[in-house]
Structures are given as structure tokens and as C-alpha cells.
Amino acid sequence: MRVIAVIAGLAGAGGFAQIPAYSQQYLQRLAGAVDELAVVVGDFDRSAEAAGLSREDALAELAGSAFLEARRADMERTVVRYETLSGDLALLRAAGPYERAALLPARLDAEIAGRAWQDFEPSIPVTAEALSYAGIGFLALYLLSAGGGAAMARRRPAAARGR
């Protein structure tokens, strides 16, 4: 049972050690998305300002045809996405490594997370942060598997344990 617990612990260490690297890749992708959305929203805001309109007034002006209505809806979604992702980026950048890992699931954008995961390559942890996650992962899975093994040993009939 101890060998299984060590193997499980090592698997947990390897998996948990990847959390900092993945969160860093996600953060980089999030920052890139925010940068690009800032260009689109900024262009729209400058066009509105040049016409003497606020963003809200410019959006309201996009009416009168199916195309303009669709364009208004697109731009409204873009502005909301930009504001949401900008807030998430600021929050995640301000967070420490452990807080970021705790915040990330609730702040995860599925599209960005999926693209980050496609390009993610596991690495050997060399930072203190990654090594501490590796330690947490090792202990968690080691203790779970050791505890599970001990519980299974207690459940076996006395005759089976005597062999």
C-alpha cells in the first residue's frame, strides 16, 4: 500500500506543480485579449467622440437596419467582454500566487482557458511557488491514497488478513 501512496503522491506533485505555469500562461493570454479588446473599444470611443457622442449615444445611433442592429449588439458584447476581462486581469495580477490559484476558477474565461490549455506544455517546476504546489499535491494524494489503503485493509475479513 505504501508504494501506491508514494506513486499517487508523485502524480499529485507533478500535477499540482503545473498550476503556477498554467495560471501564468492563462494570465498572458488574458492580457493579450484585453489589449486587443482595448484597441477595438478605443477605436469605437474615438469615433463616437469625433461625432460628438458618448459611447452609449453612439451605440444607440446604430439602429435602422438589421445590419446596424446586429453591429450594435456585437459592439455592446465587445464592450462588456472588455470590461469584464479587464477587471479579471487587474484582480488576478494583484493576487499572490496562491490567491490567484483560488480566484482563477471563478474568473476563468472558457475561450481563453481553452486556447491556453491547447498550447500548454507541462514543465519541471523550478520556482519556489511551483515546488510548494508540488509538495501540496504530493501530500494530498499520498495521504488520500494511504488513508484509502488503510481503510481497505480494515474492511478485509480477519481470515483474509491472516494470510
Image: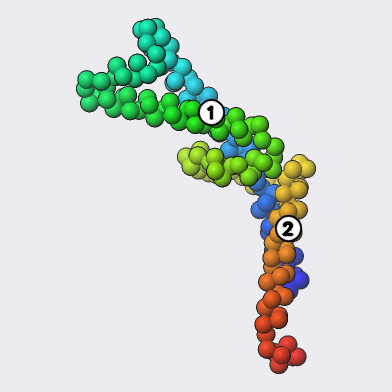
Name the mark on residue 104: none
* Image coordinates for residue 147, horizontal then vertical, percent: 71, 70
Tell me which residue sits at (67%, 82%) in the image: 155
Label 1 vs 2, first from the N-terminus: 1
Three-letter code, disc 1: Ser
- Say if 52 sits above or below 10 in the image: above
Tell me which residue sits at (59%, 42%) in the image: 104
**Residue sitting at the far right:** 128
| Number of on-image labels | 2
Three-letter code, disc 2: Phe
How many C-alpha atoms fall within 10 Å of the one at disc 2: few (<14), some, or many (≥20)?
many
* Image coordinates for residue 58, horizontal then vertical, percent: 35, 16
* Image coordinates for residue 92, horizontal then vertical, percent: 62, 35
Residues at badges 1 and 2 in contact (C-beta under 8 Å)?
Answer: no
* Image coordinates for residue 10, horizontal then vertical, percent: 72, 59
Residue 153 visible, this angle: yes
Image quadrant assignment for residue 98: top right
Residue highlighted by disc 2: 138
Q: Report the mark closest to the observer, 1 or 2.
A: 1
- If the image is split into quadrants, where does the N terminus sit? bottom right
Q: Secondary structure at mark 1?
A: helix
The colour scheme is rainbow
On screen, residue 79 versus residue 18, left or right, reads left
Tell me which residue sits at (69%, 76%) in the image: 151
Frontmost residue, 20 versus 82: 82
Residue highlighted by disc 1: 86
- If the image is split into quadrants, where does the C terminus sit? bottom right
Image quadrant assignment for residue 45: top left
Residue 125 visible, this angle: no
Q: Secondary structure at mark 2?
A: helix
C-alpha separation, residue under disc 1 versus residue under disc 2: 35 Å
